[in-house]
Image: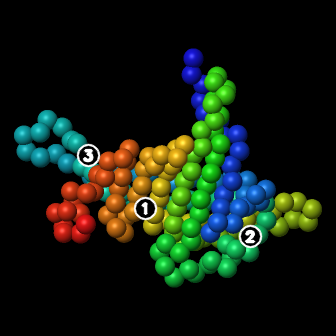
Amino acid sequence: MGLPRTLKNMILFNEGQAYLGEVNSVSLPTLTRKMEEWRGGGMGGTISLDMGMEAMEVSFTAGGPLRDVLRQWGTPTVDGVYLRFSGAYQKDDSAAVDNVEVIVRGRHSEIEMGDQEVGEPGEFTATVALAYYKLVWNGRTEIEIDPVNLIEIVGGIDRSAEVRAALGIF
């Protein structure tokens, strides 16, 4: 029997500050490859060529305004904001708990203050355009993507190493 891992709890850190009890949802980055269709002479059909990665983003929602995020608005560098998501995922068939961390660097592309209603928690949402992404599962790095430095490591294999070497950038 195999049951899915369920997110039992999570926390978001911004520059090391824990948003304990403040952030109630995080939309982790979607990893998307840019694909271009190709059908050359002599081919019996079309294939998709991998043209690299699409841009990544993360967003999160808090129950009210976060001053730290507002003060980061307009950060001048592409990697000026450091966020870390840490989630505890548990399987109900074995009770095993996995720690999944997603570490990102980027800058806020959108901050939405949302509707404010007296006596109700608000919705404060921030979207962050990413320049760096790393997924760590139980302490082991599974994926690390650094587009600026042409790094793409998946399952311990640096898939961009040969390209960097060919370009003379180690």
Q: Which mark is residue 48?
A: 3
Residue 126, placed above or below residue 92? below
Question: What residue is shown with label 2?
Answer: 66
Query: Viewer-nearest of labels 1 and 2?
Result: 2
Dividing the image into 4 quarters, which one contains the C terminus?
Answer: bottom left
Query: How many neighbours does mark 3 have within 10 angstroms: few (below 14), some (14-19), or many (20 or more)?
Result: few
Q: Residue at x 76, y 69 (%)?
A: 65
Query: Viewer-nearest of labels 1 and 3?
Result: 1
Q: Which residue lies furthest to the front in this view?
A: 139
Report the amino acid beneath label 2: Leu
| Residue 3 in picture, x, y percent from top left | 60, 25
Is 10 displayed left or right of 33 in the figure? Answer: right
Report the amino acid beneath label 3: Ser
Q: Residue at x 43, y 62 (%)?
A: 55
Q: Which of marks 3 and 2 is nearer the N terminus?
A: 3
Question: What residue is shown with label 1?
Answer: 55
